[in-house]
Amino acid sequence: MAAVCVFCASSVHLDAKHLDLATAFGKALGPRGHSLVSGGGRVGMMGAVAEGARASGAHTLGVIPQSLVDLEVADTASDELVVTTDMGARKNIMIERSDAFVILPGGLGTLDELFEVWTTATLDLHRKPIVVLDPDGFYSGLWTWLGEITETAFVRRPALAQVTLVTSIDAALDHIERA
């Protein structure tokens, strides 16, 4: 059983396919014995993944800064809700409390979280699996660019290998379970 941290969008202005992906990923956690670590929000994909996880019987841990609690977006239905002082503390707790990371489509916050866990992995500060779940090519431009800059030595090829890109929920969970 793994505590799977999901990084994803919290926007309420998203295409339904992204919300459906988040819900389906959350629902896949319980039957496979995993728990969810999320950013503690109840909106957008973040809320959908948490609702899906709870619907499947998975334990949910939300980690949210007080500033977002004040905006009334906290997932108060979480089995455990940790309120932090700021976004940096939020990320640190999410990383500490997770066994693996799955990145779904998202914006700047999601990219920040992806690069945080990826950078710390390249520094050998953790050896937790990092999986980008990209069934529709959302991250294909980013992935292409990252591959291209390996030729400039700004990113080393072994660093790229520390993140696994998959197109299905089962492939994401299979990878985590093998790691």
Image (spheres, grey):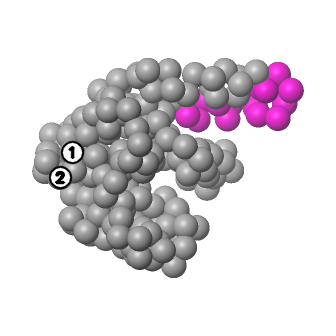
Q: Which residue in the structure is indicated by mark 2?
A: 54
The x and y percentages for residue 58 are 19, 51
Q: Is residue 173 visible?
A: no
Q: Residue at x 21, y 45 (%)?
A: 52
* Viewer-nearest residue: 8 or 13: 13
Q: Are the two marked residues, 2 and 1, in contact with CB atoms closer than 8 angstroms?
A: yes
Q: Which residue is most to the front? A: 13
- Looking at the rendered structure, the kind of residue marked 2 is Arg
Q: Which residue in the structure is indicated by mark 1?
A: 52
Q: Secondary structure at mark 2?
A: helix
Where is 45 relative to 152, above or below? below
Q: Residue at x 79, y 26 (%)?
A: 149
* Viewer-nearest residue: 54 or 172: 54
Q: How many neighbours does mark 2 have within 10 angstroms: few (below 14), some (14-19), or many (20 or more)?
A: many
The x and y percentages for residue 134 are 45, 26
For marks 2 and 1, give the CA distance. 6 Å
Q: Which residues are magenta?
A: 149-163
Query: Where on the picture, by quarter, is residue 32?
Result: top left
Q: Is 121 on the left or on the right of 93, as rendered?
A: right
Q: Residue at x 28, y 46 (%)?
A: 48
Q: Residue at x 29, y 63 (%)?
A: 75
Q: Secondary structure at mark 1?
A: helix
The x and y percentages for residue 162 are 58, 35
Where is 122 relative to 96, above or below? above
Q: How many neighbours does mark 1 have within 10 angstroms: few (below 14), some (14-19), or many (20 or more)?
A: many
Where is 140 relative to 131, above or below? above
Whether residue 154 is in magenta: the answer is yes
On-image quarter of the C terminus: top left
Q: Is residue 78 visible?
A: yes
The x and y percentages for residue 98 are 41, 56
Q: Is 62 on the left or on the right of 24, as rendered?
A: right
- Looking at the rendered structure, the kind of residue marked 1 is Gly
